[in-house]
């Protein structure tokens, strides 16, 4: 089985650095982007299985990014990482980006974050799932 790749997108350098350090040793390749545009560039050149994106980012927000990913790379699982907890924001993200999971900030790396990614990895190659 090929090693899977997860792309993490957040404009906060502290969040990306926390993930870089905290996810060392996880059973997947990790890519990091500090903007939606950088994420799209990586998706053009790298085989990515899961994208974990913040919602609130300058220039292009995470929801717009995830909608583009859904259109161009429909087999990529999409996970939202956000401090936004308003029901309308959550529903909009889920309904328009076809989100697999929503992780709310502040999250616990061991209790929330790692299990969500590992769970998604189990389904990446499941052909009958529509994500």
Image (spheres, grey):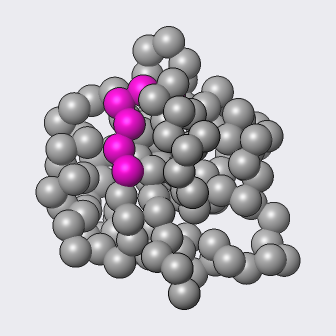
- State which region is magenta: 31-36
Residue 80 on image: x %, y %: 51, 46
Residue that sits furthest to the front in the current view: 45
- Point out the image quarter for the C terminus: bottom right
> Would residue 40 appear left or right of 127 to someone viewing this image?
left
Res. 43 image quadrant:
top right
Viewer can see residue 81:
no
Residue in the picture at 65% in, 51% down: 99
Q: Is residue 52 magenta?
A: no
What's the residue at 76%, 41% (across, down)?
72
- Rendered-image quadrant of the N terminus: bottom right
Name the residue at 35% across, 78% down.
27
Does the rendering let one see residue 113?
A: yes
From the top left corner, tell me how far across and down residue 97 is, in percent.
Answer: 71, 41
| Residue that lies at the very extreme toward the top in this rendered image | 59
Pick whichever, 10 or 44, lies toward us: 44
Is 12 placed left or right of 67 in the picture? Answer: left
Residue 35 found in image quarter: top left
């Amino acid at each position: 089985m090929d090693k899977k790749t997860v792309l993490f997108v957040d404009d906060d350098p502290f969040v990306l650095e926390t993930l870089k350090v905290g996810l060392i040793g996880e059973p997947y390749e990790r890519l990091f982007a500090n903007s939606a545009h950088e994420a799209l560039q990586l998706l053009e050149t790298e085989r990515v299985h899961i994208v974990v994106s913040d919602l609130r980012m300058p220039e292009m927000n995470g929801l717009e990014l995830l909608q583009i990913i859904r259109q161009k790379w429909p087999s990529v699982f999409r996970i939202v990482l956000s401090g936004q907890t308003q029901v309308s924001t959550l529903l909009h993200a889920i309904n328009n980006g076809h989100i697999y999971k929503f992780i709310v900030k502040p999250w616990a790396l061991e209790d929330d974050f790692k299990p969500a990614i590992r769970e998604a990895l189990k389904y990446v190659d499941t052909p009958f799932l529509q994500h």
